């Protein structure tokens, strides 16, 4: 835990002074416990968090820190942690680095007094992704492929959380391309994106088809272990709590995306990604000759064996029940440990990968581009 908190604190130094200080304060809390320093007022918290996570494994270093921080934020958003809320912009507060000792004190107070209320948040099976800016990562490769035949599409998001990514074609965009070219689409939230590298010009030209792509998407299906319903205030708060409290633009984008999603028919499949693919592959999508699966910063939570089963299930669907369909699987994900990468992709934070049917029973991968987890620039190969 201490190592994970240190890594997350270091990551936040460049992006969130509040969360850098918060995670550093949590490091001190856990170090005190480890050193045997009296933490009587936090014993209930330590016992509860250990109970919540004792039989649980975490794939990435940031999962436990973000669940801890999200639970604290949720308490502040609900008005149950006024001492903490005064530092959170999302609650009308403000944080200065000189206030770190006061922040640390507030954190201890909330952990010591509110730990039982935070159990449902800590017990979530996965961190619910809530970044609404990842749409271009799957829209650009889909447009590049779809623009040739312009077929009706069944769109399926894996690890969809509340399904906000499924309506990204309806968001607003201001895209800067090569040679100072500009392209825009109205909508809320609105994102500014820069396209760069060798394939940028071709990708930029495909954006003219984005307005008609939306009309071609006849079904929008989200798969998640615990899909969130944004119409429910408590579930909506889970999404808001995982936004960093000092990142108000991102919080406003989330709320705008929820409003936009209300204009679409989005259906959910509850369950593991692998099981969802197996169930969906048995359905008859006769009115949609094309099927596009996508996931953005979601399969990174799967260990290698689990990811292997997902890939096998999708390969089986592409070459079996969906063999008569034009199928794509698009990912915006970190490189996996055993992934054989082309030289030009090495060192990139997130890769945009496009998988398609290959041969009689296989699947091949094309590296479309790269970006960040919250992409403002997309390199197109």
Image: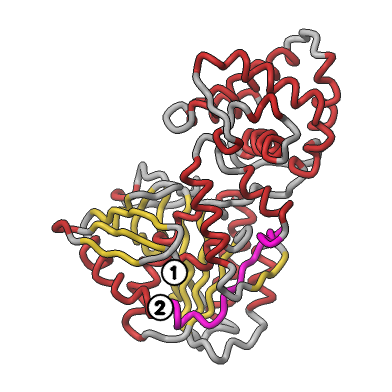
Q: Hey, which residue is sitting farthest bottom in the picture?
A: 286
Asked whether 219 falls inside the magenta stretch, the response is yes
Relative to 139, say whether 233 is above or below.
Answer: above
Q: Residues within 10 Å of mark 2 (few under 14, many from 20)?
A: many
Q: Is 358 above or below relative to 204?
A: below
Q: Alpha-carbon neighbours of circle 1 within 10 Å: few (<14), some, or many (≥20)?
A: many
Q: Position of residue 80 (x, y in %)?
A: 75, 34
Image location (x, y in percent) of residue 5: 60, 27
Residue at 52% x, 70% y is: 293
Q: Residue at x 35, y 49 (%)?
A: 376
Measure the C-alpha gap from mark 1 to mark 2.
8 Å
Residue 264, picture quadrant = bottom right
Residue under circle 1? 169
Q: Which residue is mark 2?
A: 213
x then y, percent, for residue 257 = 52, 59
Pointer 1 or 2: first along the chain: 1
Q: Would residue 126 be found to the left or right of residue 89 on screen?
A: right
Residue extending furthest toward the left: 179
Q: Which residues are magenta?
A: 213-231
């Amino acid at each position: 835990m201490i190592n994970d908190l240190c890594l997350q604190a270091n990551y936040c130094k460049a992006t969130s002074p509040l969360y850098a200080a918060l995670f550093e304060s949590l490091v001190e809390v856990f170090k005190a416990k480890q050193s045997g320093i009296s933490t009587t007022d936090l014993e209930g918290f330590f016992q509860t968090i250990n109970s919540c996570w004792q039989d649980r494994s975490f794939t990435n270093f940031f999962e436990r820190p973000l669940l801890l921080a999200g639970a604290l934020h949720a308490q502040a958003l609900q008005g149950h942690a006024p001492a903490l809320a005064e530092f959170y912009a999302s609650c009308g507060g403000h944080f200065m680095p000189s206030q770190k000792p006061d922040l640390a004190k507030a954190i201890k107070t909330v952990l010591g007094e509110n730990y039982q209320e935070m159990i449902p948040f800590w017990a979530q099976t996965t961190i619910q992704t809530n970044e609404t800016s990842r749409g271009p990562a799957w829209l650009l490769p889909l447009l590049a492929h779809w623009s040739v035949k312009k077929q009706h599409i069944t769109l399926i998001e894996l690890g969809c959380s509340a399904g906000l990514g499924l309506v990204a074609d309806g968001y607003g965009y201001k895209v800067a391309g090569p040679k100072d070219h500009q392209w825009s689409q109205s909508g809320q939230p609105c994102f500014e994106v820069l396209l760069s590298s060798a394939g940028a010009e071709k990708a930029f030209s495909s954006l003219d088809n984005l307005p008609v792509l939306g009309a071609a998407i006849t079904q929008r299906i989200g798969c998640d272990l615990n899909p969130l319903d944004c119409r429910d205030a408590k579930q909506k708060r889970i999404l808001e709590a995982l936004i960093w409290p000092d990142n108000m633009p991102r919080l406003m984008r989330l709320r705008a995306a929820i409003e936009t999603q209300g204009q679409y028919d989005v259906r959910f499949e509850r369950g593991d990604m692998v099981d969802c693919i197996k169930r969906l592959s048995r359905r008859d999508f006769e009115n949609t000759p094309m099927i596009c699966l996508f996931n953005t910063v979601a399969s990174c939570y799967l260990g290698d064996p689990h990811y292997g089963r997902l890939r096998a299930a999708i390969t089986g669907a592409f070459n079996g029940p969906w063999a008569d369909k034009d199928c794509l699987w698009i990912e915006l994900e970190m490189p996996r440990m055993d992934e054989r990468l082309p030289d030009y992709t090495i060192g990139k934070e997130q890769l945009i990968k496009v998988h398609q049917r290959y041969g009689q029973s296989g699947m091949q991968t094309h590296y479309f581009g790269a970006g960040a987890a919250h992409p403002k620039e997309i390199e197109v190969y």
